[in-house]
Structure formats: structure tokens, C-alpha cells
Amino acid sequence: MFNKIMFLLVTIGVFCSAQAVDWTKVSQEAIKQNKLILVSVEREGCHYCEKMNKEVFKVKTNKTKISKDYVHMIVKINEVELPKSIKEVKYFPSNYILNPKDMSVVDQLVGYMKPDDFLSLLKVEYDEEEKNN
């Protein structure tokens, strides 16, 4: 009986621990689609993260605009291992624009932003990266 309980606890622990994201696959998909990677890092209980999610990321027209130029990943800090190029996240929400070829950080957009402002900045960043490549 003790072994069954331990097995159950270990199994639950594995499923509740940090989720794995295969950043290599994300990178390959972005390269294939000629897109940049947008990693939105949130913290549990963060009011501004929830606000940005509700007003920006969950709005269908905004999702469509973002997915035109970006492979977008929304992750919770301490639940997913971040790409090595994202060293330390101090502020939430933090949005990292990554170059899919080497996973380097192209830019970081910190804090809540109004939808139009955020989408405009993403467009400027994408256009700038396209011009440089």
C-alpha cells in the first residue's frame, strides 16, 4: 500500500512540476514560417499579466495580428524553463522578442501595454528585423 501511495505522489509531482517546452521545435517552426518568436512571461497572481492577457492576447483580432509575424508562447515563470538567452525576469509581464535562428533576445517589452501600443511595437520590431536580415 505504501508503494502505491508513493507512486501516486511521485506521478502527481511530475505532472505538477515545470512543463517542458521544446524551444528547438519552436525555433524551427518560426524559421519555417519566417517569423520571430514572442515569449510572454507572466507571474501567478499578477494583475497586469491578467489584464494584458484579457485585453491583448485573448482578443481574436489581436491574436491574428500577432500570429502574422510571431510564434507566440505565453509561459508562467517557474513553470516552464525559459530559453537560455532570457537570463533573469524581474518585471511582469515581460515580453521577449527572439530571433529564431540563434534564440537571441532582439528586444524586451516590459509591463502592461495598451493593445494598440503593443501591436505597433511588435510590428516595428518585426519590420526592423526583416530589414536587417
Image (cartoon, helix red, strand yellow):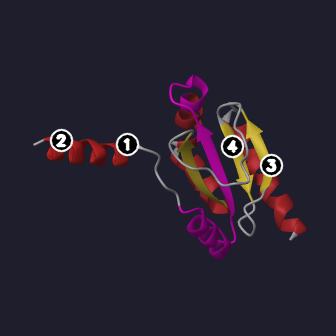
What is the spatial separation of the Cα atoms under label 4 and label 2, in whole angstroms? Answer: 41 Å
**Amino acid of disc 4:** Asn
Q: Position of residue 91 (x, y in %)?
A: 70, 30
Rendered location of residue 17, percent (x, y): 42, 44
| Distance in Å between CA atoms under marks 4 and 1 | 24 Å
Residue ID for mark 3: 107
Q: Left or right: 48 with respect to 99?
A: left
Among numbered discs 4 and 3, the one appearing first in the sequence: 4
Which residue does the image show at 28% across and 48% down from the upper left? 11
Residue of label 4: 95
Residue type for callout 3: Asp
Compared to 29, does 21 lie above or below?
A: above
* Residue tagged 1: 16
Q: Earlier in the sequence, mark 3 or mark 1?
A: 1
Q: Return the residue nearer the eye: 23 or 62.
A: 23
Secondary structure under tag 1 reads: helix
Q: Secondary structure at mark 3?
A: strand
> Disc 2 and disc 1: Cα gap in Å?
16 Å
Q: Amino acid at mark 1?
A: Cys
> Which is in the foreground here, disc 3 or disc 1?
1
* Left-right relation of 16 to 74: left
Report how far apart the C-alphas of labels 3 and 1 lie in the structure. Answer: 31 Å
Answer with mark 4 or mark 1, whichever residue precedes in sequence: 1
- The residue segment tinted magenta is 22-50
Question: Dot 4, how many residues are within 10 Å of its Cα: few (below 14), some (14-19), or many (20+)?
Answer: many
